[in-house]
């Protein structure tokens, strides 16, 4: 075997590997070499060689992990490599190639954005196989216009036959008044044509991003390497490089969504970019940064994300009064939601008082859902484990607090935006500030993977979902308007929490504080990664 490669910043780090009995021996050696080289390896099986096993049972889960972003790239092995390639390419978003020589190992990535390499365990030896994998992982998509154009055409064809045979549950959400958005962004999603396919086939209406998403996209792929190198050599600092990369991605995605923005008269078609998370408690800094980002993006269909902290509220009001679209993020509590809605309405009133139009001013209030249960459920489980008079009540509200909070928030939304005060504003062109359900991926494996989507389908709302949740709902969702069902029960659930010793306002304040830190940490990690990459590039400068 050849000497293992070393993982460099910006390279794909999470590599999935799968094989049947025909590729088992080679797979085991590749897993060893990849780990030795510093990669995070996902082994999708088989765990031992079985003569009667079937390659789709291992290759398809690997392919789905690559398509969802759980793995950056994949290596699939069977006896000849052909079966593995056929199976992998049946998964939407996968571009697999059967490779037995080094030219195609890099050319397949550079021209065709190949994300899964398929090898024949009975065809190539271990030394050649490792060389092919090394070459595959070191290559990156060129992004040339002609290649993007061709991939877009391939994406248009992908899975049309399969999807025409069954109802698309994601598209059905639109008929129920809910807009489905994607909580994910990465350059190859746009360049490879996948975003356009999601818009056309799934009815995707918008996209959200956050520092954590950008950290995974930039630090965990090759897509940005050349831009980082060029800007580093030009003397740009890490923050400037991050902003250039993130702004380009948001602009490109917004351009893909521009037809949606036009068709819906500005209701949908938005892409969000967050202010520096370290400004969460800095009103003036938030306002200044939001103004700068809004001007730099220069698109009508973008949102600037501002956290719903105490300091964020006056910033939201000011930005709305200036005509800057705002996605209010990190919203957990009902009292804070009322304050957010008030900030938006006061901003609209201030803009109208200046004699300016509000027709094209848009905002959403992003209410984070599943994280509430993630914090409250363990408290309830502790009560249940201890026994006593409160056990039955704790069991009744277990797993229900997040959805109850969202349902009560929707009733507040109807109250506020159905008021006489706001009707006067709508008569002058104002739009409602829609509730956007965020954090809708299921964290608890005991719950349905579409739990937080199913329960919150309702008119004039948005649901932004991660790739995995989007795929799950497409596959087995059951669209039905449920948001206003059991509204009294939702009130009952929240009213019972004090009897269990749970202060929901304290819980949501804790979630807000933790939410800020959860964005600060990946942002800081990304800055460190960019600093190392810039240093390496500068040290190689001729």
Image (cartoon, helix red, strand yellow):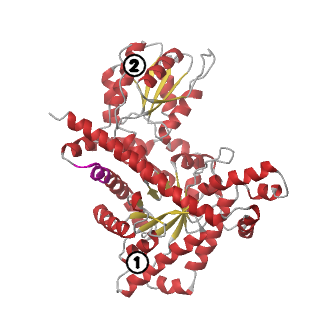
In the displayed image of the protein, which residue is found farthest to the left? 542
Q: Quadrant of residue 114?
A: top left
The quarter of the image holding the C terminus is top left
Q: Which of 210 and 432 lies nearest the eye of the viewer?
A: 210
Q: Which residues are magenta?
A: 236-244
Determine the secondary structure under disc 1.
loop
The numbered mark at residue 37 is none
Q: Which residue is mark 2?
A: 130
Q: Position of residue 444 (x, y in %)?
A: 65, 47
Residue at figure coordinates x 35%, y 44% from the top left: 528
- Residue 176 visible in the snapshot: yes
Looking at the rendered structure, the secondary structure element under dot 2 is helix
Q: Earlier in the sequence, mark 2 or mark 1?
A: 2
Residue 490 against residue 145 in the figure, above or below: below
The dot on residue 359 is: 1
Q: How many marks?
A: 2
């Amino acid at each position: 075997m050849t000497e293992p490669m070393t993982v460099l910043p910006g390279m794909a780090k999470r590599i999935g590997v799968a094989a049947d009995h025909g590729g088992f021996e080679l797979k085991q050696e590749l897993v060893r070499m990849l780990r030795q080289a510093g990669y995070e390896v996902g082994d999708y099986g088989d765990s031992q060689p079985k003569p009667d096993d079937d390659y789709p049972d291992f290759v398809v889960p690997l392919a789905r992990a690559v398509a969802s972003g759980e793995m950056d790239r994949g290596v699939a092995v069977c006896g000849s490599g052909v079966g593995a390639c056929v199976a992998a390419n049946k998964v939407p978003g996968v571009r697999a190639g059967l490779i037995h020589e080094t030219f195609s190992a890099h050319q397949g990535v550079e021209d065709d954005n190949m994300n899964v390499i398929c090898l024949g365990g009975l065809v190539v030896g271990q030394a050649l196989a490792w060389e092919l994998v090394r070459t595959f992982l070191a290559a990156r998509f060129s992004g040339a216009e002609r290649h993007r154009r061709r991939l877009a055409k391939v994406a248009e064809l992908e899975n049309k036959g399969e999807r025409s045979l069954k109802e698309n549950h994601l598209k059905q959400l639109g008929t129920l008044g809910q807009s489905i958005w994607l909580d994910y962004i990465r350059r190859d999603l746009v360049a490879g044509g996948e975003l356009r396919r999601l818009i056309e086939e799934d009815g995707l209406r918008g996209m959200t991003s956050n520092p954590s998403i950008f950290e995974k996209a930039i630090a965990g792929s090759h897509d940005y390497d050349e831009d980082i190198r060029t800007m580093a050599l030009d003397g740009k600092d890490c923050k400037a490089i991050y902003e250039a990369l993130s702004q380009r991605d948001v602009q490109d995605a917004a351009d893909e969504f521009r037809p949606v923005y036009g068709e819906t008269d500005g209701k949908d078609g938005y892409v969000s970019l967050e202010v520096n998370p370290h400004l969460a408690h800095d009103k003036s800094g938030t306002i200044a940064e939001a103004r700068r980002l809004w001007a730099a993006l220069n698109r009508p269909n973008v949102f600037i994300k501002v956290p719903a902290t105490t300091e964020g509220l006056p910033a939201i009001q000011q930005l709305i009064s200036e005509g800057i679209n705002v996605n209010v993020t990190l919203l957990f509590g009902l009292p804070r939601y009322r304050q957010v809605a008030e900030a938006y309405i006061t901003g609209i009133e201030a803009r109208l008082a200046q004699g300016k139009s509000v027709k094209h001013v848009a905002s959403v209030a992003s209410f984070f859902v599943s994280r509430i249960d993630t914090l409250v459920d363990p408290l309830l489980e502790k009560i249940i484990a201890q026994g006593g008079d409160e056990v039955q009540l704790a069991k009744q509200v277990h797993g229900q607090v997040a959805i109850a909070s969202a349902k009560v928030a929707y009733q507040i939304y109807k109250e506020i935006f159905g008021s006489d005060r706001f009707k006067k504003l709508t008569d002058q062109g104002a739009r409602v500030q829609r509730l956007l359900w965020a954090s809708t991926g299921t964290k608890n494996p005991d719950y349905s993977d579409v739990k937080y989507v199913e329960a919150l389908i309702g008119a004039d709302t948005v649901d932004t979902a991660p790739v995995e949740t989007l795929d799950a709902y497409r596959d087995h969702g059951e669209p039905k308007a449920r948001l206003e069902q059991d509204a009294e029960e939702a009130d009952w659930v929240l009213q019972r929490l004090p009897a269990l010793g749970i202060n929901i306002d304290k819980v949501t304040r804790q979630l807000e504080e933790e939410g800020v830190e959860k964005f600060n940490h990946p942002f800081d990690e990304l800055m460190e990664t960019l600093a190392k990459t810039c240093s390496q590039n500068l040290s190689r400068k001729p």
